[in-house]
Image (spheres, helix red, strand yellow):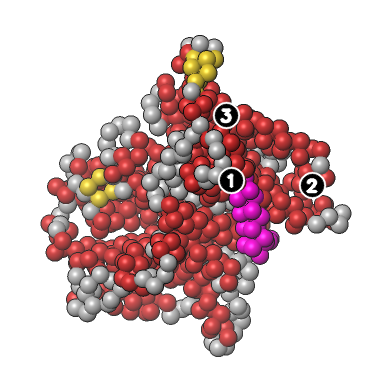
Amino acid sequence: MSTFVLITVTGLGLAGLYFLLAAGLSLIFGLMDVLNLAHGAFFGLGGYAAWLVLDRLDVVAGLGWRFLVAVLVAAATGFTAGALVERLLVARSYGDHLGQVLLTIGLGFALVALLGGSFGYDARPLPQPAWFGATTPLLGARVPNSRLLVLAVAAVLFAALLLFLRRTRHGLVIRAGVENRAMVRALGIDVSRSFTLVFAIGGLLAAVGGALGAVYFNGINPALGTSQLIFAFIVVVIGGLGSVTGTAVAAVLVALVQQLVNYYGAAGVGDIAVVGLLAVVLLARPQGLLGAVAR
Amino acid sequence: MSVATGPVGRVRGGGALPVAAAVVAVLAVLPLVDVAVPVVLPGAVSSPGALQVLAVGLVFAGLAMSYDVLFGYTGLLSFGHALFFGLAVYGTNLLVGEAGLPYAVAAALAVAGTAICAALLGAVALRARGVAFAMVTLAFVEAFAIFLVTDPLGVTGGDEGLALASAGVPDAFRGVLNLRNTYWLALAFAAVTFVLVRAATASTAGRVWQAIRENEDRVELLGIRPLPCKLLAFVVGATLAAAGGCVHLLVVRGANPHLASADFTLALLVMVVLGGAGRLWGAALGGLVYGLLTLRLPALASSGVLDGLPGPVARVLAEPLFVLGALFVLLVLFAPGGAAGAVDRVSAALGRRPGGGPAGGGAGRGPA
């Protein structure tokens, strides 16, 4: 029982990471029809930004505070990177979805190689506050605090994202744009500003995911984001493109299936089981769990 | 990508075959040429090192053409093409090593098995269209890559991959000195792929593929069911890729899980777009150039070109994928249509092809 609890909580931590990566992807695709294959690179950028702060920024005393700074720096890096990529590259080929996909592929290759060239391809372990490694008793299991932290941050960001989408004007425009882009434009609203905003938010979420992922996986390497991106894609398709709540549900589903099967089955089988889950969902419900329209 | 601008199904460039034959003839005599090409190739053209680089380039050229059947001609954005290449690489090696079959038999079985796999997986994946199809194929190839790396059955060698099981390999393809034969095999693969894809795309089915690329709904309205045609394109492309896998196994004398990864499929997409999607010679050129670049850029970086630069900049520029990725972004932004598009623009400007129109205007028309 205690093992089951431990695996489940670990799985929920992973679900948090998947959600942070997939939410941005889902919104970007829902609003702009752009499949952002450079999203894993945002994850990597965030991870290395956090690593730089934690490893090098000695001014901030206390690893706990320094970790907070690291997450904020990662968030700012991801936000800026997302906004720049949208403005400088993606915006140049609006209306040409394939061109945009190709751009993000090239960008993803270049950014990952940039990280590899700058920091090397070996994993960089992150100095962490002692509390992260300690455990908290939960239903008879001793759960590492870092798993709970990842889960808590992801949950807070999920709530913040929902509030932003439902309670602010920008959020309203984005939701309307996902529903019917042409109509929003016809009403005289500049959707391209929302495009930039969505990319920036996606970058922010992915970069925070990178900072937390570096904690979760005990280190960051350039390819980590890309390998997680595949599962984020699966989460997006299962959840339904453009639906944030669907993404959250699917993230939990995918991460739990993956962790439980990996533990009770054999290592690696869980990863493959997730692909099986994707095939089943696609055959039964091609638009995803909470997706409105099949694309 | 801007693809054929002429009427659908028209075979462009009637003089292509003589030109292609001339190119193949030139490539065929390369192993006999004893000239050094600094930087581009290690040592003289006829040296085993150089021939191996060229052979990898030729396999990639054939592979890029096989992917062009899906992407350039049918408009299917598949991220799973590397799966079929990898299946044949590992399948052949395992059949030779574990089952003790001769190489030729193993290769034939692996290609046939891959074709069956492609038919099954394609039937599932093609239920989704556009980007969803891309993601499903991506998931398939990733599942296979995970299978190779985690190696639950203990046969694939995990991260390290497998060395060529040389017992069943004919003597002609063994050893470093016979690399010239392997090179010719790679050339034959690329040439045969060119001829087959050309014939396939000019056939009735090929015309339907191109019609699907242009407008799938209209094809359906005309009373043709697109799904079997798309599945056929998927299987044809996969089978040719599988044949390439059998050759690649001999060229690099081993199987590496990287070649069955999503990254490698994206690399295939880069090759095809570099050369110009939907134009066979463009895809072939893109594959060849990509192969040479990935293998030779590290050597170029260490040749002293980057010596004057500050350390961090030099380290980043020494990454082949950084150079390729950046190059690719610039290409998509400023030269959509790739090499073939550029040639079309030049020849249109020279007035050689009235009515040909500027190809590559608008990186356009997605398969989405």
Please name the residue shown 51% across and 62% down the image: B72
Relative height, residue A263 to residue B28 (above, below):
above
Q: Is residue A149 left or right of residue B167?
A: right
Residue located beneath label 2 in the image: A170
Asked whether residue B133 is in view, the answer is: no
- Report in which chain the residue with disc 3 lies: A
Q: Residue at x 67, y 34 (%)?
A: A158
Q: Give, as a single range, the part of the protein colored magenta.
A: A75-95
Circle 3 packing at 10 Å, graded few (<14), some (14-19), many (20+), is: some
Q: Are marks 3 and 2 in contact (CB under 8 Å)?
A: no
Query: Both on one chain, marks 1 and 2?
Result: yes
Q: Is residue A118 visible?
A: yes
**Residue B155 as seen in the image, left or right of residue A289:** left
Residue bearing the label numbered 1:
A74
Identify which amino acid the numbered label 1 is placed on.
Answer: Ala
Please identify the quarter of the rendering in which residue A209 is found. Answer: top right
Q: Gap in Å between the C-alphas at discs 1 and 2?
A: 23 Å
